Image (cartoon, rainbow, N blue to C red):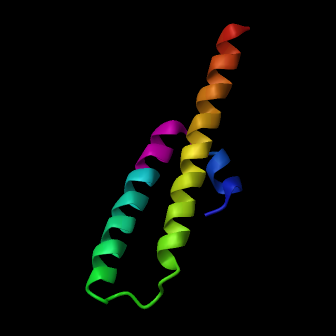
Amino acid sequence: MKMKELINKNTSDLNRLIAEKREALRAFRFGSAGSKTKNVKEGRSIRKDIARIMTQIANVNIKGKIENRK
């Protein structure tokens, strides 16, 4: 998932996406414990997606606070 895709989404969509990614990461971790995963780099990409989403949520919150000051 790219940042360009996240910029156009609102906070509720971002929260829904982060919940889905966290669930996917949980499933990946339990799958790797049982040696069911084939792609071991998938966990890294899911963690990076979560970080991107959290960064975008923070940017939206900061932008809202700045606009409220004006």
Does the stretch in magenta take in 52? no
Q: Is 52 left, or right, of 11 in this rendering? A: right
Residue at position x 69%, y 16% in the image: 67
Between 26 and 63, the residue placed more toward the observer is 26
Main SS, magenta region, reads helix
Residue lying furthest top: 70
Please provide percent x and percent y for residue 53.
55, 50
Q: Residue 56, position in %: x, y?
A: 61, 43
Q: Quadrant of residue 62?
A: top right
Where does the N terminus fall, quadrant-wise?
A: bottom right
Task: Identify which residue is drawn at 34% across, 62% down.
Answer: 23
Q: Where does residue 8 sit, x and y in percent of width and height?
A: 65, 45
- Determine whether 38 is above or below 63 in the image: below
- The front one of 41 and 18 is 41
Q: Position of residue 70 (x, y in %)?
A: 74, 8
Q: Which residues are magenta?
A: 9-16
The vertical placement of 22 against 38, above or below, is: above
The residue lying toward the viewer, choosing from 42 and 3, is: 42
Question: Where on the picture, by quarter, is residue 20?
Answer: bottom left
Image quadrant where residue 27 sits:
bottom left
Query: Is 15 colored magenta in this rendering?
Result: yes
